[in-house]
Image (cartoon, rainbow, N blue to C red):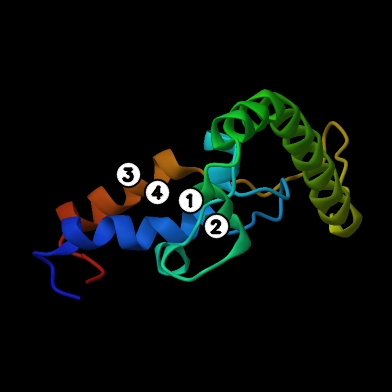
């Protein structure tokens, strides 16, 4: 891909991201935003039940209003699903973490970033640069 034409390609790249099903909430971003599933532009020209109903004018406005009314419920369900998914991931992570506890007086290795820079500066001043 050319570096100059990336702005023109951006909508084509974002379309699959917006219309693909997300594992965390079980919905597509497009569905959560607009309240209906996206129709892929290639499928618009093909005779499908969904596109035929729109062309015939069978209460499309009513269907859109109904979908918008159900949108808040879909968003709530997606939020609940996402919370379940996060709990599952948290449980998976916590199962594999080795808990460590330290008592007062024990020696603990710590990285001291402040002193690291002081050492490097002294190397340069002494002419012992490590590079």
Residue 43 spot, x, y in % from top left: 47, 67
Q: Nearer the viewer, mark 1 or mark 4?
A: 1
Which numbered disc, 1 or 4, marks the residue that appears first in the sequence? 1
Crowd rating for badge 3 (residues with CA inside 10 Å; few <14, some 14–19, many 20+): few
Check disc 1 and report its element: helix, strand or loop.
helix
Which residue corresponds to mark 1?
Answer: 55
Question: Where is 94 relative to 127, above or below?
Answer: above
Crowd rating for badge 2 (residues with CA inside 10 Å; few <14, some 14–19, many 20+): few
Seen in the image, is 127 located left or right of residue 105?
left
Question: Where is 86 relative to 97, above or below?
Answer: above
Nearer the observer, 12 or 92 = 12
Seen in the image, is 101 located left or right of residue 32?
right
As measured in the structure, the alpha-carbon distance from the residue carrying label 1 to the one carrying label 4 is 70 Å
Which residue corresponds to mark 2?
Answer: 52
Residue 104 spot, x, y in % from top left: 85, 31
Nearer the observer, 44 or 18 = 44
Q: Which residue is painted at 84% across and 42% down in the image?
A: 84
Question: Where is 109 relative to 83, above or below?
Answer: below
Q: Which residue is painted at 13% across and 67% down in the image?
A: 3
Q: Nearer the viewer, mark 2 or mark 3?
A: 2
Q: Marks 2 and 1: in contact by CB < 8 Å?
A: yes
If the image is split into quadrants, where does the N terminus sit? bottom left
Q: Marks 4 and 1: in contact by CB < 8 Å?
A: no
Which numbered disc, 3 or 1, marks the residue that appears first in the sequence? 1
As measured in the structure, the alpha-carbon distance from the residue carrying label 4 to the one carrying label 3 is 5 Å
Which residue corresponds to mark 3?
Answer: 118
Question: Would residue 98 be visible to someone looking at this image?
Answer: no
Question: Where is 107 relative to 3, above or below?
Answer: above
Tally of numbered tags:
4
Which residue corresponds to mark 4?
Answer: 116
Q: Marks 3 and 4: in contact by CB < 8 Å?
A: yes
């Amino acid at each position: 891909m050319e570096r100059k034409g990336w702005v023109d390609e951006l909508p084509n790249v974002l379309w699959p991201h917006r219309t693909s099903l997300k594992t965390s909430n079980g919905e597509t971003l497009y569905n959560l935003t607009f309240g209906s599933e996206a129709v892929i532009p290639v499928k618009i020209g093909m005779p499908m039940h969904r596109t035929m109903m729109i062309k015939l004018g069978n209460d499309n406005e009513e269907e859109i209003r109904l979908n918008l009314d159900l949108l808040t419920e879909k968003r709530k369900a997606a939020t609940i699903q996402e919370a379940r998914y996060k709990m599952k991931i948290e449980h998976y992570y916590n199962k594999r973490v080795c808990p460590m506890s330290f008592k007062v007086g024990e020696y603990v290795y710590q990285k001291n970033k402040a002193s690291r820079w002081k050492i490097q500066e002294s190397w340069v001043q002494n002419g012992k640069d490590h590079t």
